[in-house]
Image (cartoon, rainbow, N blue to C red):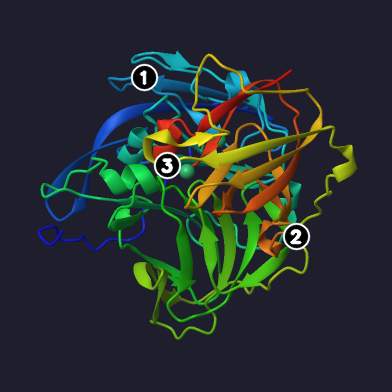
């Protein structure tokens, strides 16, 4: 839209949410879903929604082993839920569509963190409204730290050299308002916007050290898949996938992230001349820039090893299940059925290990996601997954005609969702429920 003038701005860094419980090993947080306004463009006020603020939400940072309580208050004029994407907790605390928070109400999930350091996120999961509410700005990051993340010699200074990047695409109407009118194409392939926001800013820049930077990337878009590269063509290393660190850094020059997926990367700007700018691009289009203008006070090297991931033995699996993406537009389904709140599609024994085989009988790529569990990818069309998918995954892309086998141990009880993470597909019913007991 040419009437809207992009503001020159630095990358917003979401605040770290204050832990209200002084006791060690315990944490208490307060989150309020509310309406807000933003100035994405010069002099234009855009109506938005966010958590504790105008757009997106604070970063919740916890530690493995910590007992966490969160008070989630809904100040919106409609129901919402708050789901912890990637967190291994019981169904009751998962924040899926059954955990509805009515306007004016407070929901108080409690859980103990029992998974390794990872970059997770939270977002609403209200039936048929997830796409709209996330689009309006409701999403935030959830960091888990542990002894491994403490001991690794990688950048850790929040917002300085350890920087979150929440990448989202949006469409603005002539008045600069968020446009979520779904056209024919949007309801078929998922929403795609013309403007990319990073942490809620259009084309922001960030001052970068002439050295190593750690970027925690979340594709928080409703449907878009990004293929990220740096404008100078430089290589970088992926160090973590959805559920935590990879065993070893994986060298790459482009990164594909589907909606809902996360990737942590280390990028070394030490060869970039002082004062130069490096842009981050999606299919060749720049959407943010790094201005290398600070001497790096610490010299980092790429760690040889990050963590140890115990491979789940395939022979431990007691059940195999198939999930097939089918249909298009309003008829999208998994295994031929659409989401029904009153129907349990799959029953899983608590503590059991299962192999899930996800197929795609449609003409487009879909990200498969399940709640309350982290998977290991066994194979894609019979071949071992690429190195950057050899760690913990809760969301993974499935291409047309592809068959992805994953394995997981189901350690938490309750009702959970599995679905396509293109939110328009999820809202249209490309979702099912599994009960663990
Ligand atoms: Cu990111 Cu069911 O969600
Ligand atoms: Cu989820
Ligand atoms: Cu889909």
Under tag 3, what secondary structure? loop
Q: Are marks 1 and 2 in contact (CB under 8 Å)?
A: no
Does label 2 or label 3 sit earlier along the sequence? 3
Q: Position of residue 133 (x, y in %)?
A: 35, 33
**Mark pair 1, 3: CA separation:** 28 Å
Decide: few, some or many residues near mark 1? Use Cα within 10 Å; few <14, some 14-19, many ≥20.
some
Q: Is mark 1 within 8 Å of ligand 1?
A: no
Q: Position of residue 354 (x, y in %)?
A: 78, 35
Using the rendered view, name the quadrant where residue 146 is placed. Answer: top right
Q: Position of residue 174 (x, y in %)?
A: 11, 50
Does label 1 or label 2 sit earlier along the sequence? 1
Task: Return the mark for residue 33.
Answer: none
Residue at mark 2: 384
Does label 1 or label 3 sit earlier along the sequence? 1
Q: Nearer the viewer, mark 1 or mark 2?
A: 2
Q: Position of residue 433 (x, y in %)?
A: 59, 25
Task: Return the mark for residue 328.
Answer: 3
Task: Return the mark for residue 79.
Answer: 1
**Mark pair 2, 3: CA separation:** 29 Å
């Amino acid at each position: 839209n040419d009437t809207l003038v992009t503001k020159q701005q630095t990358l917003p860094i979401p605040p770290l949410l204050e832990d209200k419980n002084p006791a060690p090993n315990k944490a208490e947080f307060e989150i309020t879903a509310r309406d807000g306004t933003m100035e994405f463009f010069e002099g234009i006020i855009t109506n938005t929604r966010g958590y504790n603020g105008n757009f997106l939400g604070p970063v919740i940072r916890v530690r493995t082993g910590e007992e966490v309580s969160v008070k989630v208050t809904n100040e919106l004029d409609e129901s919402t839920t708050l789901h912890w994407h990637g967190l291994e907790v019981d169904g009751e605390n998962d924040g899926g569509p059954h955990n509805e928070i009515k306007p004016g109400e407070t929901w108080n999930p409690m859980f103990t963190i029992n998974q390794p350091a990872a970059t997770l996120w939270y977002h609403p999961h209200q039936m048929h409204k997830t796409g709209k509410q996330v689009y309006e700005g409701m999403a935030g990051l959830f960091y888990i730290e542990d002894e491994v993340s403490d001991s690794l010699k990688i950048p850790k200074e929040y917002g300085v050299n350890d920087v979150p990047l929440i990448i989202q695409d949006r469409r603005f109407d002539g008045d600069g308002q968020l446009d979520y009118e779904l056209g024919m194409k949007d309801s078929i392939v998922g929403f795609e916007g013309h403007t990319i926001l990073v942490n809620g800013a259009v084309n922001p820049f960030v001052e970068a050290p002439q050295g190593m930077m750690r970027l925690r990337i979340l594709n928080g878009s409703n449907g878009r898949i990004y293929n990220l590269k740096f404008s100078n063509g430089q290589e970088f290393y992926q160090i973590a996938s959805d559920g935590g660190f990879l065993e070893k850094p994986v060298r790459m020059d482009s990164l594909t992230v589907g909606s809902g997926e996360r990737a942590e990367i280390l990028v070394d700007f030490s060869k970039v001349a002082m004062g130069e700018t490096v842009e981050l691009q999606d299919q060749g289009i720049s959407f943010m820039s790094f201005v290398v203008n600070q001497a790096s006070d610490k010299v980092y090297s790429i760690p040889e090893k990050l963590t140890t991931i115990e491979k789940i033995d395939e022979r431990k699996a007691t059940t195999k299940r198939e999930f097939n993406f089918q249909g298009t537009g309003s008829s999208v389904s998994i295994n031929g059925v659409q989401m029904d709140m009153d129907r349990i599609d799959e029953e899983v024994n608590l503590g059991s290990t299962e192999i899930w085989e996800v197929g795609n009988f449609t003409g487009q790529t879909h990200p498969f996601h399940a709640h309350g569990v982290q998977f290991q990818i066994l194979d894609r069309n019979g071949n071992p997954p690429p190195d950057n998918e050899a760690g913990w995954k809760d969301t993974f892309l499935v291409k047309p005609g592809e068959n992805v086998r994953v394995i997981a141990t189901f350690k938490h009880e309750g009702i959970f969702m599995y679905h396509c993470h293109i939110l328009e597909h999820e809202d249209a019913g490309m979702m099912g429920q599994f009960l663990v007991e």
